Amino acid sequence: MLVSLHVKNLALISETEVNFGDGLNILSGETGAGKSIIIGSINLALGARADKDMIRTGADYALVELVFQVTEEMQQEISALEIPVEEDGIVIIQRKIQPNRNLFKICGETVTAKQIKALSELLIDIHGQHEHQSLLYKKNHMEILDSFAGDALADIKEEIKEKYLEFTKVKKDLAAFCVDDGTKAKELSLAEFEFHEIEEAGLTEGEDEELERDYRRMANSRQIVEAASKAYQLTGNSDQTAADAVGHAVRELRSVETYDDRARELADELENIDALISDFNRGIAEYMSDMEFDGELFAQMEERLNLMNHLKLKYGNSIAAVLAYQREIAEKIERLQNADAYRETLENRLQKAQEHLEKLCRKASRIRSKEADKLAKDMVEALTDLNFMDVKFEIQVRQKEEMASNGFDDVEFMISTNPGEPLKSLGNVASGGELSRIMLAIKTVLASRDRIPTMIFDEIDTGISGKTAWKVSEKLGALSQSHQIICITHLPQIAAMADCHYKIAKQAVKNKTVTDITQLTENEMVDELARMLGSDEITDTVRENARELIRTARKKKFEHARP
């Protein structure tokens, strides 16, 4: 579950921290108070796009931190993603937003946005204010059905994806190979030319690096000889050398070594240095003798390097890449020389890949059809609970002509919300308020199968009121028995069901507008519900109405909680 949210220097928020509880957490406030900033900040911590304009005016950075408490089972899943978890099952996600960079951390370790996304999919499901509109698009219906099917379909989908990639590759190879004889002749001629051009060069892997070192040394031989000659003179071939100075020092110490053992030790050390200088002097003399410039050899090296660089420019950025390209060309020559046999091989591979893929697609389709019946039944029950009095819901699974990476099914949600009306596509029937309830029904049904502990609803109450609002409230209350729910709402019926209630408000602080969030006490919850009931003045009567709402909500929650 989400334990806490800490926000600093983000938009209208100077600094605030919220500690969330189990069950249903309600966020309410006047329009424009900044409720969307709270949900937005959670999204930011989980990888949503950030803009430097989000940083509060006058601040250098913005910071969002989420603290989650996870189960032992979930700890193992998170560790499998190579993401750190603290010993007590605490996961801390932190995002620092700066003008020129963003930094993600999990439990103090810097991580990538990809890791954040993978972790968020385990921990939280966020239903945005306009997400229910996604139900209008048929392409999303399959995703919902597949999510409901879960493990029953997951492995098959992975196989389909893998085999589809294999199928499309073979199909592409065959299409590319099925060209006229004239084109094949040109391709064969070019391939043979490229193969022989590389072959004639007689390349050896690593040869270019070694040759470049020798070429660089020879090209700079004059500067090398000048520097070596100076070193030679300073160490032993001039009037005043390092060897002479060290020799003189040795003699001075030897003259007093009989008086002190330490003087003898120092003299021995200097003699070793003297011997090293002599060895160095002989070595540098040999080095200079080897540095003679050979113009003919230099020209050969230059010509060889030019050839290798030319081939690397055409076929790869290294000798290894050029040789790998030559092997590919050799295979292509063999294919072109044996075109009929190769085409037949590709056709056989394509047929087998297609048959295997079709078999997997049929298997996935059977699973989808079976799960579609279950989901439709559960949806009717959930929608009835949400005040759809005579609803029919059906999921059609139809086979398309073309296969894709997720199979060959076309999935569409069909609904009838009034008696006597035929089933129609969901996108052509439902209103805004109906869509929000349908999405809540979907989330509720899916929640019975998934293990995501925290769900966030941003204004799930769009377009509803009265008795329907109570039905939505009851559904959220029931869902909160097994999940932590965080919900932004304007409706008192939903707010009355809260286990924890938070008020979001704007105020002026030192001539600046600040958004803050406060957890309400029992009496403060009553006053906030009284405000949400729409009364101009909060009187004792209005407060009593608010208390009655809370009593009714708690009674309904108790009834749902009973076995």
Image (cartoon, grey):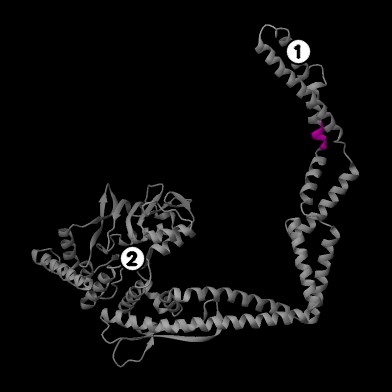
Q: Looking at the picture, which amino acid does disc 1 mark?
A: His
Image coordinates of residue 489 in percent, x first then y, are 27, 67
Q: Which residues are magenta?
A: 221-225
Q: Which mark is residue 248?
A: 1
List the single residue furthest toward the left. 540
* Nearer the observer, 149 or 38: 149
Q: Which mark is residue 155?
A: none
Q: Quadrant of the C terminus?
A: bottom left
**Left or right of 387, for residue 306:** right
* Nearer the observer, 88 or 395: 88
Give SS at disc 1.
helix
Crowdedness near tag 1: few (<14), some (14–19) or many (≥20) residues, C-alpha within 10 Å: few
Q: Looking at the picture, which amino acid does disc 2 mark?
A: Ile
Among the two numbered marks 1 and 2 on one chain, the one whose residue lies closer to the N terminus: 1
Image coordinates of residue 499 in percent, x first then y, are 23, 63
Give SS at disc 2.
strand
* Main SS class of the magenta portion in the image: helix
Q: Is residue 222 magenta?
A: yes
Crowdedness near tag 2: few (<14), some (14–19) or many (≥20) residues, C-alpha within 10 Å: many
Q: CA distance from mark 1 to mark 2?
A: 87 Å
User: Up-down: is 444 above or below 91?
Assistant: below
**Left or right of 83, for residue 1:** left
Q: Quadrant of the N terminus?
A: bottom left
**Left or right of 531, for residue 272:** right
Image coordinates of residue 458 in percent, x first then y, are 32, 67
- Which residue is tagged 2? 456
